[in-house]
Image: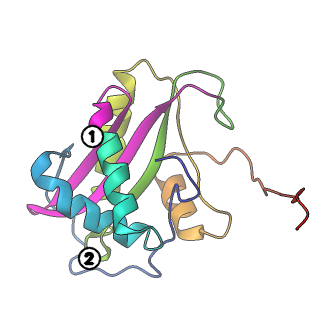
Amino acid sequence: MDGPHHMGEPVKGRTHLDTSTAHVEVRPAAAADLLAWADMRAALWPDTSADDHRLEIEAIVTRGHEQAICLLALVEGAHRGFAEVSLRHDYVNGCDTTPVAFLEGIYVAPEARGRGAARALVAAAEAWAGGRNCREFASDVSIENTASAAMHMALGFEETERVVFFVKKLCAD
């Protein structure tokens, strides 16, 4: 789950089939959910290969629910979203405690947005984190990902800082 694609890029705009609150069930991913989970990961992170998605899913499943979890949102019984959460024991920007629950990625299918799935996923992630003695829940988004930033704010996250990374190559060819 570590890497350059923590939050992915948003799907532009919001598409709704029905703006009413739907029945949303949130539960940990199980073996029967792996294909749907992989498909939703591919929608969130389209630049990641299918093999890399498979390897990352296997890593999450192998770690068990003590260090990482994938929570699925089923809206009216269909897979419509997921949240991947991990425990981080290293420094997390803006946090004062350890471990920190970290929202590695969250996705809700366009047709299910605005129906409570993201809120339900985050609430379940918070409950999971609380059971692991976390006092803080963190996440990140790229600066230009304003849709994800707005979602985070709506879900109770507070912006702590903005960062621009730099690199300077030291090898001469």
Q: Position of residue 70 (x, y in %)?
A: 30, 45
Q: Which residue is mark 2?
A: 111
Residue 149 is left or right of residue 58, and the answer is right
Circles 2, 1 touching at the beta carbon (< 8 Å): no
The quarter of the displayed image where residue 65 is located: top left
For mark 1, does the 10 Å Cα neighbourhood hold few (<14), some (14 to 19), or many (20 or more) residues?
some
Q: Which residues are magenta?
A: 61-90
Going from N to C along the chain, the mark reached first, 2 or 1, is 1
Instruction: Residue at 13%, 47% (x, y): give it.
Output: 31
> What secondary structure predominates along the stretch shown in magenta?
strand
Q: Position of residue 109 (x, y in %)?
A: 30, 70
Spatial CA span between label 2 and label 1 = 27 Å
Residue 61 is tagged as 1
Which residue occupies the foreground of this view, 131 or 64? 64
Residue kind at label 2, given as amino acid type: Glu
Residue 86 is left or right of residue 23, and the answer is right
SS at mark 1? helix
Residue 145 is left or right of residue 106, and the answer is right
Q: Is residue 97 above or below residue 55?
A: above
For mark 2, does the 10 Å Cα neighbourhood hold few (<14), some (14 to 19), or many (20 or more) residues?
some
Q: Is residue 74 magenta?
A: yes
SS at mark 2? helix
Q: Nearer the viewer, mark 2 or mark 1?
A: 1
